[in-house]
Image: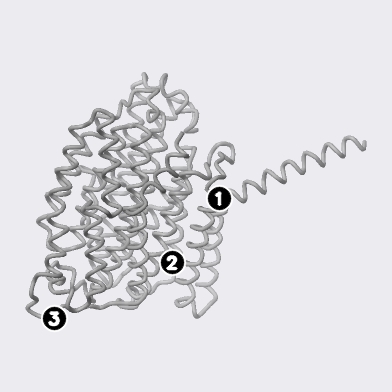
Amino acid sequence: MAESLTAVQKLSNKYSKTYMQDFINILPLSIIASGIFISVLIEMYSKYSEEILPWFSIIMLISSAVSSIALINNTQVIYNGTLATGGNVYIFYFMFTMGAALTVFSSIDYIKKYGSYFGEYYILLLSSVLGMMLMAGAKDIFTIFMGLELMSVCFYVLAGINRKKSGANEASLKYFLLGAFATGIIVYGIALIFGTAQTTSIEIIVANFGVLSHNILFIAGMLLFIIGFSFKIAAFPFHMWAPDVYQGASTAVAGLMSTGGKAAAFSVLIIILSAVFPGNNVNVFRPYFAVIAALSMIYGSIVAISQTNIKRMLAYSSIAHAGYMCIGLAAGNYESVAGIIFYLAAYTFMNVGVFAVVAMIEGENDTNLELSGYIGLSRKNPKLAALMALFMFSLSGLPPFAGFFGKYYIFISAVEANLTWLAIVGIASSVISVYFYLRVIVLMYFSEPETEPAVVGGGYGVFSAVIAALLILVLGVFPGSLLSLITAYLK
């Protein structure tokens, strides 16, 4: 009897330690989830929720970011093989949470400017981050789908959160309709994958990819799944929603959608294509990614030149950047994956920063969004002009900023994969993009304004842009630090 009790106690202690370890491993997720629950209570019961929620959200997001870095070595697959922790998953977590924290900072003044505070704003923002985190850590297709829907539904609402603007309502509706269409394609792809593989476990699918790739229905399912996520990354020709949504949505929200949403979608593509990255299996999707990479880069860069609205220009720029990262997916080697993750980290802080500056310069009723509104900005507000110039230099891929090294790693991986022609297209696209990025700098510093440029600034937005700029400089000066960390968890 005593021996039986001892065995039970040992088993109980074993499971207690396992559950405690699992809880520690998902701490970044738990912080965000508990933050959502508490935010709902604050909004329901506190009359000071408008002042409390932004700072509470920032605390939750930064706490999650810090815990992601602290627990990065805890690489495990938990909950019956449905969720991965540690490693590059937590590097994605850091991107999502820090990008969202900077978005909240820039939102504080932006919401006051438009008088459009709604309590659900910060709750939806935290919920969208939770969806991104589930996508990046998924080891099961249904976990991916659950995270995708959580993120997407939040973005549909956030795009139209400023109900007083007809443009925001239009953006929300367009995003919802095209997003629902993309989701339908993804679901159809999942059905074909499950029907042929008889499982939704990504690890099992990856292990049996060599056999499954001979099944035409499996390849069709994978292709539909990838096409659905091509909508989410706004790659050509699945980009049609991006310019209108970026222009109509709140500027701070557009910054998060263009960074966190894109990074989450790329994390899923990296996960689902992990079977072909070591080179053990033929990358049957290389032609697809090579074509959409080339078309996205060329189309995005050329059309951005003709844009006079800065948010639309950044939308077409986002299409081009999706093309650069698709080069890595076409290359399909470990170096390309490391390059994509580095590029996403750099792009997250570049774009969050530039949208923070745009949000400060933007006036009520969408004024100051034309490029002409930036003429002579260096005379009116030299700090904002300097920050904007830094982000433009980095987005254009000029050294020594983080954007340069992101493109460099991607192009090198393409050459190593015998896709030199694609790297050449990428370089040509980068040369074209230099024009429309530097055009903003020329307007700010070398053009005489007919009237004084109006600047509707805010201290919190400046802080957000400064932090983003510092992160870009750190990644540009010490790119090897992040790249070596990413590479260490790939093999």
Give the CA distance from mark 2 to mark 1: 26 Å
Give the CA distance from mark 2 to mark 3: 35 Å
Q: Which residue is mark 3?
A: 452
Of callouts 2 and 1, the N-terminal one: 1
Pinpoint residue 456: horizontal percent, then vertical percent: 25, 78
Residue occupying the point 18% across, 68% down = 369
Q: Is residue 432 left or right of residue 10?
A: left
Whether residue 460 is visible, yes or no, is yes
Residue 71, numbered label: 1
Of callouts 3 and 1, the N-terminal one: 1
- Element class at badge 1: loop
Residue occupying the point 44% across, 30% down = 194
- Element class at badge 3: loop
Pinpoint residue 61: horizontal percent, then vertical percent: 48, 62
Query: Identity of the amino acid at label 1?
Result: Leu
Quarter location, residue 296? top left
Q: Which residue is mark 2?
A: 122
Pinpoint residue 126: horizontal percent, then vertical percent: 45, 61
Query: Is residue 411 depicted above or below 147 in this figure?
Result: above
